[in-house]
Image (cartoon, rainbow, N blue to C red):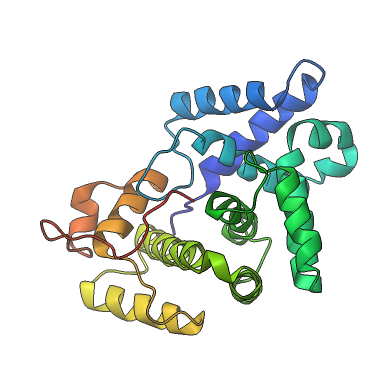
Amino acid sequence: MRQPHKKRIQVAVSILSEAAKRVNELDRRALVDYLRKTYEKTGLSPIRGKTLPPDIYDKELTTLYVIGKYGLGLAQDYPYMFSKIFYVEENLDMALDLILQGDIEGAREKIKSVSPTGVVDGNMIARLLRIPLTKFIFGFMSEDEFTKILHTVYNAFPEEEKTVKSYVKFFIGLKLAEAIYRGEIRSREYKEAFKRALAIRIGFPKTTPSDEYVRAIAEAVFNMSKKELSRVLRVEEGEKDAGKEEDK
């Protein structure tokens, strides 16, 4: 079976190894630039939806953070590197713990401390959710755990209902794209059943992505061709997802 994340993990490990050697000369901006150049050389794209916003490589540092902390244990070996470079992800990770403990105000303050605008907005909630999503992608969190976080954040930040639902759509689209890549979905009928069953299972039955959105994720994240996807996905001219199609 095809391994969808093998190359991304290998590249992340290589970047983290280089960062550990050069921690005294690197800052967050420099590592973002190094990440971008490395991805361009290796043909990788950040984990994302349809759009490619200016800060996408800064957001993609979450991949390095999750693999470094939960996969390699580097946060214990190189605490200075994590506090110097991954301070955004560390604070959002702590905010997630506070949310799960019921300390919503404490979580808000943690999020505000690393927000470019000093407020809790849709961009910061998307960044917050990117951490558990990335943990799930690489096997450090179960689907049940991720689903619990989705609902907890949904209830904790009712003003960001649209953002959370947009992230649910992205999650389902990513799962569909990965299943197609693995060869687990081979027909349009099964794709529809898979999508609707997943939406029901995670508790958001009406929040599903269109084929166009799934195709965009499959092409960007898994480097799949339109020809590969055409037997499973249908994209009619003018078809669009309802709601916000934000990168995650």
| 162 vs 83: above or below | below
The spot of residue 56 in percent (x, y) is 50, 38
The extreme top residue here reads: 25
The spot of residue 200 in percent (x, y) is 44, 84
- Identity of the residue drawn at 76% across and 71% down: 100
Residue 80 seen in this snapshot: yes
Residue 60 seen in this snapshot: no
Name the one closer to the observer, 70 or 243: 243
| 120 vs 10: above or below | below
The spot of residue 9 in percent (x, y) is 59, 43
- Identity of the residue drawn at 83% across and 36% down: 83
Total numbered labels placed on residues in the image? 0
Name the one closer to the observer, 172 or 7: 172
| 65 vs 211: above or below | above
- Identity of the residue drawn at 44% across and 63% down: 166
> Is 62 left or right of 215, judged from the image as shown?
right
Name the one closer to the observer, 5 or 177: 177
Quarter of the rendering occupied by the N terminus: bottom left
> Is 6 left or right of 51, judged from the image as shown?
right
Image-quadrant location for residue 173: bottom left
> Is 70 left or right of 240, judged from the image as shown?
right
The spot of residue 79 in percent (x, y) is 88, 37
Name the one closer to the observer, 179 or 199: 199
> Is 248 left or right of 130, judged from the image as shown?
left
Image-quadrant location for residue 33: top right
- Identity of the residue drawn at 33% across and 66% down: 209
The extreme left residue here reads: 237
